[in-house]
Amino acid sequence: MVSAVPPHKLSSLRVWIVVALVWLGLRVSGLSHTLPISFLTIVPDADYLHAELTFNPFELTFASELDGNKNGQIDPHEWVEQETNVTARILECLKLEIAGRPIKAEIAGLTPDIESHHVTLRAHYRIDARGRQVRIESDLSRITSGSHLTQVTFGSEDRQQWARLDMQSKVATFEPANGLIVPTHPLLQAHAREARPFWILLGALAAVVLSTSGLQLIRRLITPRLNICPADSSKRTSGLDRS
């Protein structure tokens, strides 16, 4: 006779599995958060060249200046007060040229994400850059750190080019006909390798929790060993004797 699993034990196990999934998710997010990386997307259309930079503001050398009340974070009202200053200082480090001609942003601003502690700078340049050479020079290491990396994605979804900018490689040129693909930086490759096992384990745990067979497996793991009643034992013994 198999002992039934007490409902409170099964519920407790589910809670621990959820806790493990959350911990793994935070662990993987923490890995990407600690690397000094920003992500720049550049998309040309008929009227504007759009640039979008997502970065961690605490990597800025002047981050302490933004935290006016010294509470360890940059509050929404502090972003409002410092938006013009921060936008200008970042754009000074990002220089764009179209067919050899420097261009300036017509509209630019910041959008902070309080949940992720990251900020997105959006800049719009009034020019039709389609079919023309686009050159980007990044000097973000001057206001961040020497190890800062910028992953650049250029173009629309159907045709994209990629580049990696850092202190040693500050310039990338995107040609209208030939794609430029710069190999991913070793630190990013190492990060991907380190994070992959966590995602695999996270997915496996989720599959176990959600699948019927997984629940049955969990019940077996927490079910005590089979208890054979004396009556059942005698029946099996007599059956063997008759055979």
Image (cartoon, rainbow, N blue to C red):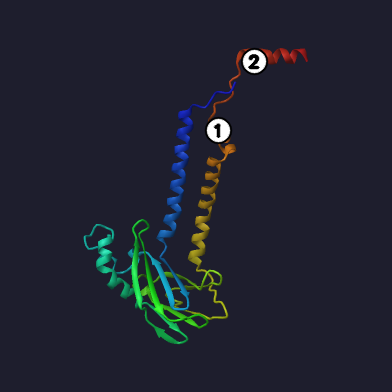
Mark 2 crowdedness (10 Å alpha carbons): few <14, some 14-19, many ≥20: few
Mark count: 2
User: Looking at the rendering, which quadrant does residue 100 occupy?
Assistant: bottom left
Q: How far apart, in angstroms, are the residues tagged by discs 1 and 2?
A: 24 Å
**Residue beneath the point at 47% across and 37% down:** 14
Tell me residue 37's x, y (percent).
Answer: 42, 66
- Earlier in the chain: of badge 1 and badge 2, it is 1
The residue where tag 1 is placed is 221
The residue where tag 2 is placed is 232
User: Looking at the rendering, which quadrant does residue 126 occupy?
Assistant: bottom left
Tell me residue 159's x, y (percent).
Answer: 56, 72
Tell me residue 172's x, y (percent).
Answer: 48, 78
Given the current orientation, which residue lies at the most extreme bottom position? 100
Q: Foreground: 142 or 18?
A: 18
Amino acid at dot 1? Leu
Q: Secondary structure at mark 2?
A: helix
> Vertical placement of 88 versus 218: above or below?
below
Q: Is disc 1 in contact with disc 2, using a CB cutoff of under 8 Å? A: no
